[in-house]
Image (cartoon, helix red, strand yellow):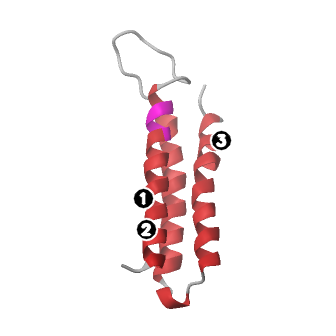
Amino acid sequence: MKLKPFLVIGNIVGSGLSAFWIFYYFSNGPLVKSRPRTTVVEPDFFLLLLIWGAGAYFVWRYFSKREWETVPYVDIVMTSLTLWLTIPLGFFITTSFVH
């Protein structure tokens, strides 16, 4: 298996799992008013997944337009870092809407 596609796909999947876990934890957890014996989901936290999804789409589109042999590792590191930074950005934007 080639290393460059593995790094890109691995970062998309890893950051996606992290974004989903953060979404799930905070939509059911500490920032939501608890009600006994009910599950309350704060729908504003879906914005976190939308922002991450937009970042993942742009990263995948960036690499799908290029040949893997021409992609330097610096591009992979910088776009992966940008993808991981969409999670705190989405969290910051999402928490501004939570009451």
Q: Quadrant of residue 95?
A: top right
Q: Amino acid at mark 2?
A: Ile
Circles 2 and 3: CB atoms closer than 8 Å: no
Q: Is residue 73 above or below residue 99?
A: below
Residue 85 placement, left or right of 34: right
The residue indicated by pointer 2 is: 9
Circles 2 and 1: CB atoms closer than 8 Å: yes
The residue indicated by pointer 3 is: 92
Which residue sits at x=33%, y=11%?
Answer: 37
Q: CA distance from mark 3 to mark 1?
A: 21 Å
Q: Amino acid at mark 3?
A: Phe
Nearest to the observer: residue 78 or residue 2: 2
Which residue sits at x=62%, y=62%?
Answer: 81
Q: Mark 3 or mark 1: name the one nearer the start of the chain.
A: 1
The residue indicated by pointer 1 is: 13
Residue 70 placement, left or right of 41: right
Mark 2 or 3: in front is 2
Q: Are there few (<14), some (14-19), or many (20+) residues within 10 Å of tag 3?
A: few
Q: Residue furthest left?
A: 37
Q: Mark 2 or mark 3: name the one nearer the start of the chain.
A: 2
